[in-house]
Amino acid sequence: MTTEEMSAVLEAMGKKARAAAEHLAVLTDSAKKAGLKNMAAALRNNEAKIIEANQKDLENAKASGLSSAMIDRLTLDPARISGMAEGLETVAEQADPVGKILEKRIRPNGLEITKISVPFGVIGIIYEARPNVTSDASGICLKAGNAVILRGGKEAFNSNMVLAEILNGAAVEAGLPDGAVQFVPWSCREAVSLMLKMDQYIDLVIPRGGEGLIRAVVAQATMPVLKHYKGVCHLFVDKVCDIDKALDIIVNAKCQRPGVCNALETLLIHKEIAPVFAPRFAALMKDKDVTVFADEAFCKLVPGTAAATEEDYFAEYLDLKLAVRIVDDVKNAVDHINHYGSRHSDGILSQVDEDIEYFTGHVDSSTVYVNASTRFTDGGEFGMGAEIGISTDKLHARGPMGADELTSYKYIVRGTGQIR
C-alpha cells in the first residue's frame, strides 16, 4: 500500500473516531457500563479464536528468536484472557470519571463558574508485544468517554487484529458508536509516523513499549504524549530491616516477571547491614539464576561476583540480571536513585522511621514503596481494574493511569447578563 493510500485510510479512521468521541462524551454511565460488560463477555465467548490467533504470533516470535521474557509478554492463555475480561468488568463498575464537579465558585459579579471533568476526545495508543493492552486500553478509554485508535506491534499483530474486531463488535452491539475502538491494520513504522501527524483528529497519544519506541513517538508526535521511557527500579536495603522479608521482596521484584517495567533493576545495600545481608542475597540470586553486577565493596564481600560498570546502573535489563551497590546511608541511596533512576518505582526496605521519612520525601519517582515490592506499580493492583499505562511525566498524569487520568476539564460559566 502506498503512503497516499495509507494516509487516506488513517484520515477516514480519524474522522470516524472524532464522530464517535462526540457521541461518547455525552453517553450515560449506564450505557458505557453496558458496553464494557458486553466487551468482557465477548472475550470469554471467543477464547478459542483469540488463542488460535495468538498461537500464530507465538510461532513467529519463536522463529525470529524473541527472548523468553518477550514471549511471556506476548502469550495469551485462558487465565490471561479471563483476566482481561475481569479488568473490563472492574472498569465498568468504577465511578464515572466524566462530569465530576471539580470546583465551583461564584464571583462578586454573580457569575457562577463550574469546573467539570470531560473526556480528552480521541486517544492514540502505540504499543509493542503485549496484546492485553488492546483490551485494557479500549476499556479505559471508553469508560472515560474517549474514542481510541490502537496501533500494536508486529509481534502481536494477529492477536491484536482479532481482539480489536471482537471488542469493537461487542461495543457496537451494546449501542456504543461505531469507531469507538479502531485498530491500525499495518505494523510498519510508516503507519506510526503518519498517525503521529494526525493532531487534527488525535488529542493525545500514549506509547507503551521499549525506550526506542517511546523516544521515536516523542520526536515525531504533533500532539501531546504521555509516557515513561524506561523502568530502572530500585530497592534500598537499610541498616535495620527484616532480612527474611527483604529477601522475599527482592525475589518477587526481580524474578516474578523480569521483562516488565516495574521489575527491580538495581539493589542498594546499606554498608552496616551488607556483611550479613550480601552473602545470603548472593546465594539466593544464584539459586534463582540471576546474574549480579556489583561494585567493589560488594565484590569483596562476595568474591567472584561480576564487576559492575557505570552503564549497569542506568540499565533496564528486563532480564534475570541485577546491578548492586553498597551505599553509606539513606541519603547516598536517594542520591543514587535520583541520578541513575527513571522516576518510575523505587522503594526502601527498612525499620528506621527517620530513614523512611527521608526516602519517601526525597526520592523523585512516580511511585515510592516502603517494605513492598515494586511489582505493585500496576493499574490492576492499584484498584483501577486495568491501566492505560504508567507515566513518569509530571503533566498531565503520573504513575499508573486509569480512567480518571484520561479526562481533562472545562469551565461552565453561567451568568444573568453580566458584561465586562
Image (cartoon, helix red, strand yellow):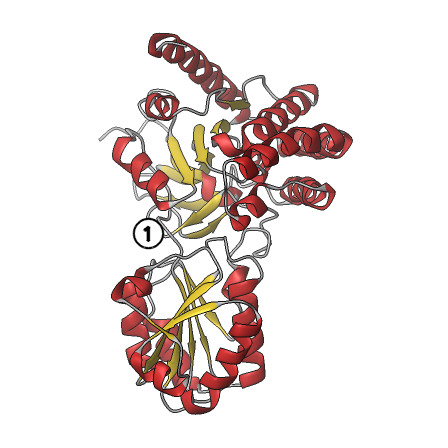
Figure check: 306 above or below 238: above
* Residue in view at x 47 percent, y 57 percent: 319
412 left or right of 52? left
Q: Residue furthest left?
A: 420
Q: Position of residue 297 (x, y in %)?
A: 32, 84
- In the image, 127 versus 391, the foreground residue is 127
* Residue in view at x 40 percent, y 48 percent: 397
Q: The C terminus lies in which quarter of the figure? A: top left
* Residue in view at x 73 percent, y 42 percent: 78
- In the image, 152 versus 36, the foreground residue is 152
- In the image, 70 versus 223, the foreground residue is 70
* Residue in view at x 58 percent, y 80 percent: 245
Q: Position of residue 82 (x, y in %)?
A: 72, 42
Q: Secondary structure at mark 1?
A: loop
Q: The N terminus lies in which quarter of the figure? A: top left
Figure check: 215 above or below 331: above
In this rendering, the count of numbered labels is 1
164 left or right of 217? right
Name which residue type carries label 1.
Answer: Lys
Residue hosting label 1? 394
100 left or right of 32? left
Q: Is the residue marked by circle 1 packed among few (<14), some (14-19), or many (20+) residues within 10 Å?
A: few
